[in-house]
Image (tube, rainbow, N blue to C red):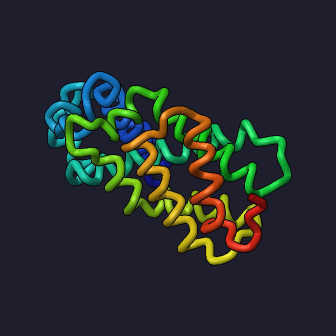
Amino acid sequence: MAGDWLADSRTEAAADRILDAADDLFTRREAATVGMNDVAKAAGCSRATLYRYFENRDALYTAYVHREAQRVFRDLLDHPTTSADPAHRIVDVVLAALRRVRESPALSSWFAPAQRPIGGEMAQRSEVVKGLAEAYLASLGVDDVERRARWLVRIMISLLLFPGRDDADERTMLEEFVLPVVLGDRASR
């Protein structure tokens, strides 16, 4: 029996449609206020269908965070920094990632100050976010990437929750306080 060779692609398309509906809701409301009923209604499906793809709100949120983290990372790779210096590259990529999250109403809602800022929790425990940060640092020749990537993600969350005065202020903070930890002896500043 050959089976349904399109089943996986239909499942993926349905999950993407649900995540797209959640994205639309996150654009209009703070992420912490969006529930499964809201997502099912926005996606045009029943709650039973929604739960077939995402067993609970945490699973939906996790899938959304993973998808969007991968999109942000791909966007950053499509616009590489021109510097060969790892210190410049790290600062440029972190600032670009922060800007990308802040400019997206859906992503910035995860760090909204009026509600519990669930973006920090999700980023902190996401294996995808962790893996992307580790892969990026490893590509720059950074050692002990697991620990240093965890630190870098924490700093990015902190800056999303408590931004600097402007890009220049955040650049200075990254150069003075983050690069020495992330690059160790290799920090050029």
Residue 1 is at least partly visible in this image: no
Compared with 10, 180 (above or below) is below
Residue 18: x and y in percent read 33, 35
42 sits left or right of 17 in the view: left
Asked whether residue 157 is in view, the answer is yes
Residue 67 higher or lower than 41, as above or below? below
Closer to the camera, 42 or 81? 81
Side of 17 relative to 5 (left or right): left
Q: How many marks?
A: 0
**Residue 74 location in percent, x, y?**
63, 43
Q: Is residue 140 left or right of residue 71?
A: right
Residue visible at 42% across and 46% down?
A: 7
Q: Is the residue 174 above or below the residue 115 in the image? A: below
Q: Quadrant of the C terminus?
A: bottom right
- The quarter of the rendered structure image containing the N terminus is bottom left
Residue at the image position 59 percent from the left and 59 percent from the top = 178
Query: Which quarter of the picture shows residue 12?
Result: top left
Frontmost residue, 104 versus 171: 171
Among all residues in the image, which is located at the extreme top? 28
Residue positioned most to the bottom: 144
Q: Residue 90: where, in percent of width, then height?
A: 68, 52
Residue 186, image quadrant: bottom right
Q: Position of residue 172 (x, y in %)?
A: 62, 46
Q: What residue is drawn where x is 69% and y is 67%?
A: 183
**Measuring 25% from the left and 27% from the top, which residue is drawn there?**
29
